Amino acid sequence: MTKPVKIPFFVPWINQEDKKSVQRALGQRWLTNGPILKKFEEKIRRFVGTKYSIGVSSATSGLHLCLRSLGIGSDDEVIVPTFTFVATADVVKYCNAIPILADVDQDTFNIMPQDIKRKITKKTKAVIVVHYGGQSCDMNEIIQLSKKHNFRIIEDCAHALGSTYRKSFCGSIGDAGCFSFYPTKIITTGEGGMITTDNQKIYTKSKLLRSHGMNKTPREREASNLWKYDVMDMGYNYRLDEIRSALGISQFARIKQINQKRIRIAKNYDHEIEKINGISKPHTKKDRNHIYHLYTIKIEDDYHLTRDELFLKFAKKGIGASVQYIPLNMMSYSNNKSKKWQKSFVHANILKDQIMCLPIYPTMTSKEITAVISCLRS
Ligand SMILES: Cc1ncc(COP(=O)(O)O)c(C=O)c1O
């Protein structure tokens, strides 16, 4: 029998201000397509440093809208890392296009530019990069490839609200960025997401498709006293409502504090893990920050337990951990049984047995951090 969890893997940080903000939103007549969404979009746009932003129902819907806005369709190929959440590849399939999996760096767990290069074909229309755990990918190398081979770059920023690369914020570097506000993420709206972009076409089209391809919202129709509207394209209900936007604004007011707290916890972990044989701390690169949405360790051969044994030990002590990710090439979903293809994911196939993500959340106490460390040490 495992003990009940005493230190969960994550805890969303919801305070009194968040509750008041949601309460105020509930007093509005427009509960969706309203002014709070616009305010939230404006805040994220300014922070990331792009011309436009579009609030959406999730990062998944944001990624889907970006691909559709770029005209990605049947038989186009989109390169995605194998070491990611399945949504990154799903959205390619939503467009009837083909996700092409690429291997990741063995230290940062980010997509390898060298493997992108190997997988480029005439059909490659885009690459979706994932800034794993809150540290940016090697954007310079990927941008060089995109210029040479004429493909678009979408940044999956689900982990990266506040991550920077050479002084630019993630979400402002590629053609578009997509953030997630799922409860485990840097800030939360319950479910929710945001697209950021400088590209007017992506902005206009994503905004249209977010709400069934209709050219006017009910609120705009009411304001103009005109009932007519047109459906310009096949769209979706991918809206971010006012209640969630209100929670987002309130959460976002603490973004600096949230990321500082995460970084402080990570530094505490780093300091102690450096003294433990056989466990390596997350690798950081000099020209970018790391905001530690995930604190992912590697359990090497000279540690006295395997990763699976360590995971079980955590569970028995009531400490939450997670393995992010089982590579997509390993999933039944990938549907490619070729041994040669499986073997091409040299790093991901090793990492899958080595990595474990430790609990990290802004309200984590020193006592909780110490308990996690002693579980690793003993
Ligand atoms: C890398 C990555 N991409 C996309 C998503 C999907 O985000 P959402 O749940 O907001 O659709 C997640 C969520 O866990 C993620 O980790």
Image: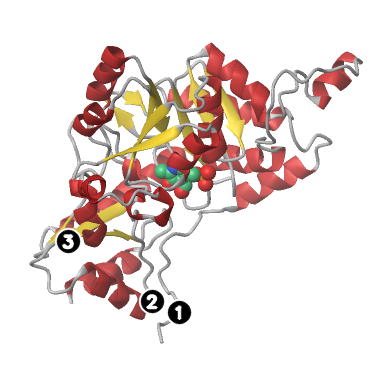
Whether ligand 1 has any atom under 8 Å from the Cβ at mark 3 is answered as: no
> Do the residues bearing badges 2 and 1 touch, measured as CB atoms within 8 Å?
yes
In the rendered view, does 206 fall on the left or right side of 359?
right
In the rendered view, does 377 fall on the left or right side of 265?
left
| Few, some or many residues within 10 Å of mark 2 (<14, 14–19, 20+) | some
In the rendered image, the quadrant that contains the C terminus is bottom left
In the rendered view, does 331 fall on the left or right side of 275?
right
- CA gap, disc 3 to disc 1? 26 Å
Front position in the image: 340 or 308:
340
Q: Which residue is mark 2?
A: 318
Above/below status of 318 relative to 183? below
Q: Can you tell which of label 3 and label 1 is closer to the viewer?
A: 1
Question: In the rendered image, which quarter is residue 244 located in?
Answer: top right
Q: Which residue is mark 3?
A: 272
Of mark 2 and mark 3, the one earlier in the sequence is 3
Type of the residue with mark 3: Glu
Which element carries disc 2, helix, strand or loop?
loop
